[in-house]
Amino acid sequence: MSQNPSDTHLDTLLQHTGVAGFDPETGCAPVALPSMRTSTVRFESLQALERAQAGKARGERVVTYGRVGMQTHAALEQVFCELEGASRAFLAPSGLSAITLALFALLDSGSHMLAADCVYGPVRHLDKTVLRRMGIQVDYAPATPEALAPLLRPETRVLYVESPGSLLFEMLDLPALAEFAHRHGLLLVTDNTWGSGYIYRPLDLGADVSVVAGTKYVGGHSDLMLGAAMARDNEVVQRLNETHYAMGYSISADDAWLALRGVRTLPIRMREHAEHALRICDFLRTRPEVARLYHPALPDDAGHALWRRDCSGSNGMMAVELKLDAAAARRFVDALQLFGIGFSWGGFESLVQLVDAGSLAQHRYWQRSGNALVRLHIGLESPDDLAADLAQALDAASRAAA
Ligand SMILES: *Cc1c(COP(=O)(O)O)cnc(C)c1O
């Protein structure tokens, strides 16, 4: 779908992709594409309808009914294609539903899937509640070819990973995993919500499908739910297309519009989140309560070399291991004033999540220490104010402990 010369910077493409075309009569166009709300479309003749149906049968992006969306949706799909270097993007009503779209498109009853042990938690719920019932089996392991190879079966079809991993931001070697997957006839599906196509491009690194929760950095304002699944290869695109249509995934034009509005500022938001996160890391290093920071842009992070090789930037996500017992960690989180206690991330605001020990235990990257782990999303507030808030909350937690 990308018609742009590849030497145009992504920052430029994000401002110029998916704009409204000129009206042939008046020669003018709105700068901001309107939200094209409609449940169905009408055709000027049966011939026009039949032309559209023939295009649909060939797998082209044509509209015969409102469910797949019209101009606003198509513009957002184009933006996702630019972000991920994809030939097609398919929109879904949430990040999780974009994951189900990719998996339902590529797995059959009786298939086996290998999954990184650091995947987004709800994927395990999908496995337990739905995939298993459909006769699909999943094994989890640290995402390295050495750890995955012994788990291969003749019916293994997909390697599903998330890089950097949920909770600890463990960088995976995507090119090595793609090579491993393809050598064994598997397709590599990656959750790229962290990179959102702007700072990390899995399809360029060998992945077959990249899935993004647009709810996070693409939307950027904590006001919509959105997912997208992107691919380059024609056969994979056709499986996604068929499954997308069959399953009825659909998003509202207003949500597509909000995402388009949000994504125009993705470059400056992402840079600012990343810079603020590094400032917060600098501050946290000065605190005796901090045992370890998890943020791949830090030179001493275990994944830093892979991050330097494969990513073009970073974002506001980090995890902090605190030498606090469970009760003190709770006091720390409750004492924070500027960080909202909540899931999700990628919006303008700072968030904190006290990571559940049970979820962490499933990640082999976590070296069990008895320490608490707190995940932070560093928002667009003043980093000085955020550091002051963290300082007072750490003081409060320690004071009560003493
Ligand atoms: C939030 C998130 C999702 C799911 O996105 P929703 O839009 O909330 O369904 C998937 N993967 C990752 C890594 C996420 O952080």
Image: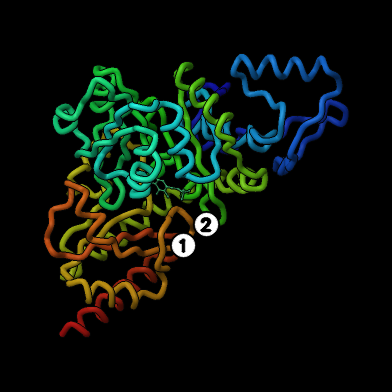
**Which of the two residues, 210 or 394, is positioned nearer the viewer here?**
210
Q: Is the N terminus in the top left, top right, bottom left or bottom right quadrant?
A: top right
Q: Which residue sits at x=45%, y=28%? A: 105
* Image vertical order of residue 223 relative to residue 398, above or below: above
Q: Could you tell me which residue is drawn at 22 percent across and 76 percent down?
A: 328
Residue at the image position 44 percent from the left and 31 percent from the top: 104
Residue 62, position in %: x, y?
A: 67, 23
| Marks 1 and 2 in Cβ contact (< 8 Å) | yes
Q: Residue at x 69, y 33 (%)?
A: 70
Q: Residues within 10 Å of mark 1 (few under 14, many from 20)?
A: some
Kind of residue at badge 1? Glu
Neighbour tally class for label 2: few under 14, some 14-19, many 20 plus, Cα within 10 Å: some
Q: Which residue is mark 2?
A: 222
Decide: is 315 above or below 160. Answer: below
- The amino acid marked with disc number 2 is Ser
- The answer to whether mark 2 is within 8 Å of ligand 1 is no
- Residue 85 in view: no
Q: How is the image coloured?
A: rainbow
Q: Secondary structure at mark 1?
A: loop
Q: CA distance from mark 1 to mark 2?
A: 8 Å
Residue 39 appears at what percent x and percent y? 73, 39
Nearest-to-viewer mark from 1 and 2:
2
Disc 2, SS: loop
Q: Looking at the figure, which quarter contains the C terminus?
A: bottom left
- 94 vs 332, left or right, is right
113 lies above or below 397: above
Provide residue 311's location: percent of width, then percent of height: 33, 37
Say which of 214 and 114 sits in front.
Answer: 114
Camera-nearest residue between 358 and 61: 358
Dot label at residue 349: 1
